[in-house]
Amino acid sequence: MSDVDWVLWAHSTASTPDQEQCGSLNLRFSVREHTSGLDSLYVGCLTCKAGRPLSGITNQSNMERLKMTCSGRQPWQRTEDAEECDATPQVVQKGASNVYFPDVHSAIDIPNTIDVAPEDEEAAQRVYDHNMWPDLAEAPDGPAASAIRTLISVQCEVTEEFVNELVRRHSSELAGTPLLSSEVTDLSQDEWTVFNSAEPRATPSASKDDLVMREVGLGVHEDDPEHLRYIAERVTKVVAVDRLREVRALRGYWRLRIDDEQYVSVHPKGSPSWLPAVESYGEGVFLAFDEQRLRAWEKEPAVHNRVVNGLEPDLDSALRQKQLRQTTGQRLLPRYPMLHTLAHMLIRQLAFECGYSAASLRERVYARGYPEEDDRRPQAGVLVYTAAGDAEGTLGGLVRQGEPPNLTEAIIRLLETGMWCSNDPLCSEPSGFANLNRAACHACTFLPETSCETGNALLDRTLVVGSETIPGFFQPVIEAATKQSVGEVHR
């Protein structure tokens, strides 16, 4: 990614020897009033008076005729870091939607779930102090490495696996690469586990940690109306996250289209141990859903057919398939589009309830399913949170909406709103880029793309509220609420 060689472009129509030999950097950009479009934009040289309008600059054949080549470096790289590149650049207007597709990865800062015992630190220091450690660290795959590793493990009273881990860390630090594989590490399981570990507490603790949370529940009792009890059967845990810290890191980006050939790493040369990132603080509300009811609902033939036989094939053929699979997991279960849509509906409802702008709220959907032989716990939850660099959303307003009875009232209202869309019946047709949505549009479920972790893809309102042929996960709640409302009217 780099700017156009404006010196070459401005002098490409040179008509005199002075203009042909000029090459001055004294350029000026101007707008001509008697034309429109790119032809009205003009780049001229103040030294030799050569110049050229921008009409035709997006035509790659013009770049080939000018023999304009790629600069070989990113804007944030030094000139000496440039690589040799003879490719012809393709000029794209900076306002075009295909200029830049960022590959941003987000993580919630959570407490370390694995405490390092002091004896492990002492054991590691004993290994580092061993007189044979430099030989092993210098040649971990050498002919004597196995014997040295065994000797160190015996004399330092540690296992060989422990020594191997220290060697791996040392090699990674020496190469300047992070302790990660080429694949993106799945952090969702640790976040899911930590949020589910929240304990009941009436008020936030005085802790100054980056993650402060407490279980608040829905506040539904046995003698409450039927539709509220139905909600409590499906939403099994509500956690008020009074404080959280989010880190968003940029790994790279795509240009023109999203595929592996167009991917550009932030660091084209090597894989350093750091990435450009931004941290922000905020608050949120976490909801966990009943796994058994969710599984039973996913086995409904109509639900299974709509997602597994309908939506997932479209996902497999989409250009963004690899990027979206990082969020959905290797299998697209019906729970993902249902919970994802519910998160969108909740954010839109909260924008009405508490005055947040939808763009200031974000979502995280925990809906990965794993094979039966996998010991990881399947996920079924959503986190709606605000985390921004300014002060909006950090004073407890969102957490207050997650406390009883505010949350149940918000759920009832969002389900009522989601029963119909002003764009029906067109809204219920497959839509979106690569048909990655079903019943979803700007009138009912879409959010600003910065608020959605998939860019408004994999949404289906029908899976939440149901239809004549598709049973929605919350359809019994809607039916019970409607029945009670009709009864109250008759009374």
Image (tube, grey):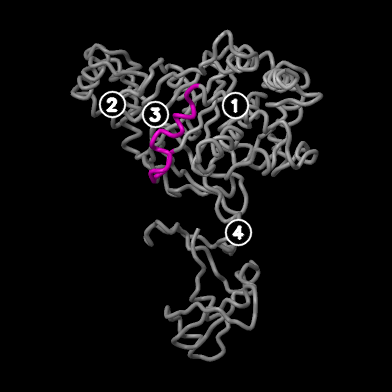
Give the Cα separation between the discs numbered 4 and 3.
39 Å
Are the residues flagged by discs 1 and 2 in contact, CB closer than 8 Å? Answer: no
Mark 4 / mark 3, whichever is N-terminal:
4
Please name whichever residue, 265 or 405, is drawn nearer the observer in this view of the structure. Answer: 405
Left or right: residue 307 versus residue 165 is right
Q: Quadrant of residue 477?
A: top right
Could you tell me which quadrant the C terminus lies in? Answer: top right
Q: Amino acid at mark 1?
A: Ile
Q: Residue at x 39, y 32 (%)?
A: 244
Mark 1 falls on what kind of element?
helix
Q: Is residue 311 left or right of residue 271?
A: right
Please state which amino acid type lies under the numbered disc 2. Answer: Leu
Image coordinates for residue 369, horizontal then vertical, percent: 59, 20
Q: 315 or 394, which lies in front?
A: 394
Badge 3 density bin: few <14, some 14–19, many ≥20, Cα 10 Å: many
State whether residue 429 is above or below residue 68.
above
Judge the density around disc 4: few (<14), some (14-19), many (≥20) Cα neighbours within 10 Å. Answer: few
Is 239 located above or below residue 158 in the figure? below
Farthest residue, direction top = 222
Q: Measure the alpha-carbon separation of dots 1 and 2.
A: 60 Å
Which mark sits nearer the N-terminus, 2 or 3? 2
Q: Which residue is mark 3?
A: 242
Q: CA distance from mark 2 to mark 3?
A: 48 Å
Mark 1 vs mark 3, CA separation in Å? 20 Å
Numbered tag placed on residue 96 in the rendering: 4
Q: Nearer the viewer, residue 482 or 12?
A: 482
